[in-house]
Amino acid sequence: MITENLPFYQLLDSGLGRKLEVISGIRVNRPSPQAIWKPLVKDTEWNLVNSNVIRTKDGGGKWEHKKDPSPGLTFPFEIDGKTLQFKLKFTSFGHCGVFFEQIPVWEWLYEEVKYLKQKLGRAPKVVNLFGYTGCASLVMAAAGAEVFHVDSSKGVLDWGKESQSLSRIDEKSIRWVQGDAQEFIRHSFKKNFTYDGILADPPSWGHGVKKEVWDFEKHIHLLVEGMLSVLNKDNSFLFLSSHTQGVQMEALKNLIYDRRWKKTACGELGVKHQNDGRILPAGIYTTGQSYLRP
């Protein structure tokens, strides 16, 4: 799943732990640990940036802007004749609210939800775990899903609601849940709730609302077991991705192994450079579908 040829995003170059991008017209220079090669474009091109991320000694970071980006800056995303507006904010650690390698994931999710809605004759119930600012949730809602968006941070939930309003997505189509992903799944199982699709993009480590500890390698098999227990046996999908160093694609695929799946896949996420054939790797994924689309 490779992101390329977008009107409002370009990856111009990368190398020596950095990447040079244009995000909704703003040229930025920010960290990219995967970029262990040498940059290709001249230093003069890198020096033209408006916004630059500076790492601090405590492991954090901060943005330095030659000109402050507009507070109303958005990333427009077009799909199936619809235009969604994702609110952009330049936060510490070099984030802006959108992970651009996820765009092919959004397109995959949109088509799966759209198909299931037609097949089921109702809005598919889907869950977005570790949902961050909610781009995928908005895409699935736009396709006709009833979405449960789960994240431990109230700040990013409010951020997602801003994008929902800007995108004119029905408020009732997304339930913004501040909570721990593992606890949400356990609660759903206890209440006999079932879902037609789950997206999970867990970090390598983190903490829940009540300081619950998340460690990918220690807890992912339990989370997957829980997800499988609340997914409908028929007509459901699962999308799981990983950005944890050392985890391989086939290992991720083995995690979701289940006889219900009629189709499975695994692969890499990445972003293609604007003017050359290099791909900046950005994680791996696996999918399972208990149905076959025509």
Image: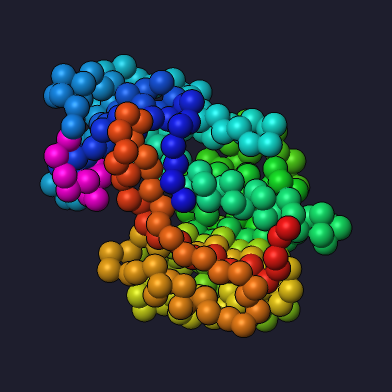
In x, y percent, where is residue 62?
25, 36
**Magenta-drawn stretch, dominant element (helix, strand or loop):** loop
Give above or below for 102 relative to 276.
Answer: below
Q: Residue at x 44, y 37 (%)?
A: 4
Quarter residue 66 falls in: top left
Q: Residue furthest toward the right?
A: 121
In x, y percent, where is residue 128?
58, 58
In x, y percent, where is residue 177?
60, 57
Quarter residue 38 falls in: top left
Say whether residue 173 is left or right of residue 270: right
Say whether residue 96 is left or right of residue 80: left
Q: Is residue 239 visible?
A: yes
In x, y percent, where is residue 275?
32, 29
Quadrant that contains the C terminus: bottom right
Q: Residue at x 26, y 33 (%)?
A: 13
Say whether residue 159 is left or right of residue 35: right
Residue range in magenta is 30-39
Q: Residue at x 18, y 32 (%)?
A: 40
